[in-house]
Amino acid sequence: MVRTGSASVAAGPTLAVVAREAGVSVPTASKVVNGREDVAPETRRRVTEALDRLGYVRRPRFDAAKTPGLVDLVVHSLESSWSGAVLHGVEAAAHDAGLEVVVSAGLTRTRGGRPERGWLDKLIARGSSGVLFNLAELTASQYAWLDQHRIPYVLIDPVLEPPQGVVSVGAANWQGGVTATEHLLSLGHERIAVIAGHQRKMCSTTRVAGYRSALASAGIRHRPEYVRHAGFDESVAHLRMLELLDLREPPTAVFVCSDHMALGVYQALAERGLRVPDDLSVVGFDDLPESRWISPALTTIRQPLAEMAATALHLLVRMMEGDRPESTRTELSTRLVERASTRTR
């Protein structure tokens, strides 16, 4: 990470010079520098271009030399085994690298319809040298704030397609969707449904694309009524499975795009007096601990969560040292873990 001493900061342009260059007031320029959201997009663009053109570097409010080994991990939630696996991976890799980790949760919580920015200010106050974001939806102003403050960051399994140049680590979701569907096809199933997560989230759309590709390669017509979205919510997945069972020609197998949602699928089948896998084969995605605890144990696609997190930490350390990764996107392979929830048609 690039740090600038007080002498070089003093030699650079002042905020007043930047404001004059961009044709805005000093308070407006200050809002852009500090990542405030109450700035028009065109105004933000002019100020950002002026900052880059003049080489403005904001004086840090902390001495990074006092805390060289501190990084932040911002997670979507601390309540799931998914987050637990990510925490485990980051902690183990950070220990090996001699780093300490500060964990924050709930970046996507909103106040008045806007994402909260308190974590940004705390980041500066405690002198963190870099940030890992897990399942986070950053706004344009938050990306700008991080870039303006020269804080390196890496996204773990980003929710949306990151802006160009942003470093991220994820799983081979498309191949995972292909593998899950091909497994069901190999067992003789043709009426295969998919219960996906959010329609607009990258991992969900990519898994569904893999599902569709596998069906097409097998010469099987894609049925739109077999594609349902449940937002990675167990209770919604339960409802979507009931909808699939009510179709005139219900599926004989279902690819569920998360192990957590598969729990809702199992519940729906039990309510209808149906058995897994005798009446319907089920494949999940993630290989979380609960996939082994439910009965019958869930066949699933293993997503290497801890390895993804450790890889992201290693990339962040390189960026903190001033090295830029050769590629901005790193994908780790997925694989089928076959258990008892699937059988021959």
Image (cartoon, rainbow, N blue to C red):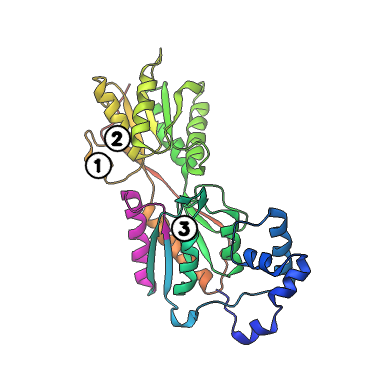
Question: Quick check: marks 3 and 2 in contact, CB under 8 Å?
Answer: no
Question: Quick check: marks 3 and 1 in contact, CB under 8 Å?
Answer: no
The amino acid beneath tag 3 is Phe
Q: x, y percentage for residue 202?
A: 52, 43
Residue 147 in view: yes
Which of the two discs, 1 and 2, sits closer to the camera? 2
- Above or below residue 124? Residue 154 is above
Q: Considering the whole magenta stretch, tell me its main secondary structure.
A: helix
- The residue singled out by tag 3 in the image is 133
- Image point (49%, 67%), residue name: 121
Could you tell whether 155 is left or right of 276 in the image?
A: right
Which tag, 3 or 2, sits closer to the chain's start?
3
- Image point (61%, 74%), residue name: 58
Q: Which residues are magenta?
A: 74-97
Quadrant placement of the N terminus = bottom right
Q: Residues within 10 Å of mark 2 (few under 14, many from 20)?
A: many
- The residue singled out by tag 1 in the image is 292
Could you tell whether 5 is left or right of 343 in the image?
A: right
Q: Residues within 10 Å of mark 3 (few under 14, many from 20)?
A: many
- The residue singled out by tag 2 in the image is 263
Q: CA distance from mark 3 to mark 1?
A: 28 Å
- Image point (61%, 67%), residue name: 148
Q: x, y percentage for residue 107?
A: 45, 55
Which tag, 1 or 2, sits closer to the chain's start?
2
What is the secondary structure assignment of the residue under circle 3? strand
Q: x, y percentage for residue 219?
A: 51, 23
Q: Is residue 73 magenta?
A: no
The amino acid beneath tag 1 is Arg
Q: CA distance from mark 3 to mark 2?
A: 27 Å
Residue 130 in view: no
Q: CA distance from mark 1 to mark 2?
A: 11 Å
